[in-house]
Amino acid sequence: MNKMSSKKNAAHSGAGDDESARGRLLSAASHLFCKNGINATGIDAIIEEAGTAKTTLYKLFGSKTNLVNAVLESEGKQWREWFIAAMEDGGGDAQAKLTRIFPALKSWFAEERFYGCPFINAVGEHDKDAKQFRNIALKHKKIVLGHIEKLAGELGSSEPAVLAHQLGLLIDGAIVAAMISRDPGVADTAALTAGPLLGQSKAKKKRELEAV
């Protein structure tokens, strides 16, 4: 094997090692941040759970703050993909998709590693004037509410943005209540509250269609 090939293989191996270490650090930090809190979780605890060196963490992320940002971005992306898929899987009309919100949340609440919403937790334990985590949280919420608003429009809501925010408040409230009570059944109560909101929008659309 020539030297050039050896250098290429070493580079690929190094990149692969970094990617593996990055994944382990994100997974470890996500678990510990959610379980114990961001401020209460030190770098040493993260590298011990991830099985990496401290120098590796700083090489890949530069600082704990950057690691927190990366965790929130990663967790947000994974959660949105799961949540949207939970609504969309099985097809049906907009009402069918929207009514899947709270059963999906109930299944999440029942998981052993359910520690609440990483964004709510991050904003809640930091200075309320700090923007770094708030901006990431708002970006996440905007995407989630945007999908719900699209379905609300298909449902026939005259104010889909308002309906999306109403459902968003029920979602956030259920998450916090489930985190505190450890009772997945709070999702059922939220669903009962959401039912009339969805029913009113669908009934209005039906009346409008019949009037045409």
Image: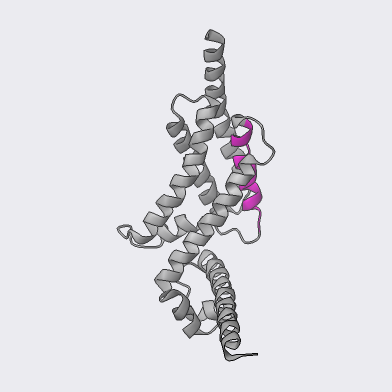
The reply to whether the magenta stretch includes residue 95 is no
Q: Quadrant of residue 64?
A: bottom left
Pick whichever, 143 or 120, lies toward us: 143
Q: Position of residue 115 (x, y in %)?
A: 56, 59
204 on left or right of 102: left
Residue 110: in magenta span: yes
> Which residues lie in the magenta part?
96-111
Determine the residue located farthest toward the top in the rendered image: 211
Q: Position of residue 161 (x, y in %)?
A: 43, 33
Residue plotted at (54% across, 49% down): 175
Q: Give the overall secondary structure of the magenta segment.
A: helix
Give the answer, above or below, for where 211 lies relative to 193. above
Identify the residue at image location x=66%, y=56%: 111
Q: Position of residue 23 (x, y in %)?
A: 57, 71
**Taking the image as drawn, is residue 185 in sight?**
no
- Residue projecting furthest to the right: 90
The chosen color scheme is one colour
110 relative to 18, above or below: above
Which residue sits at x=65%, y=60%? 112
User: In the picture, which quadrant includes the N terminus?
Assistant: bottom right
Viewer-nearest residue: 169 or 64: 64
Q: Is residue 87 visible?
A: yes
Location of residue 26 with respect to 140 vertically, above or below: below
Which residue is found at the position 67% from the left and 41% from the top? 89
Q: Nearer the viewer, residue 60 or 4?
A: 4
Q: Decide if residue 101 is on the left or right side of residue 145.
A: right
Residue 5 locus on image (x, y percent): 60, 85
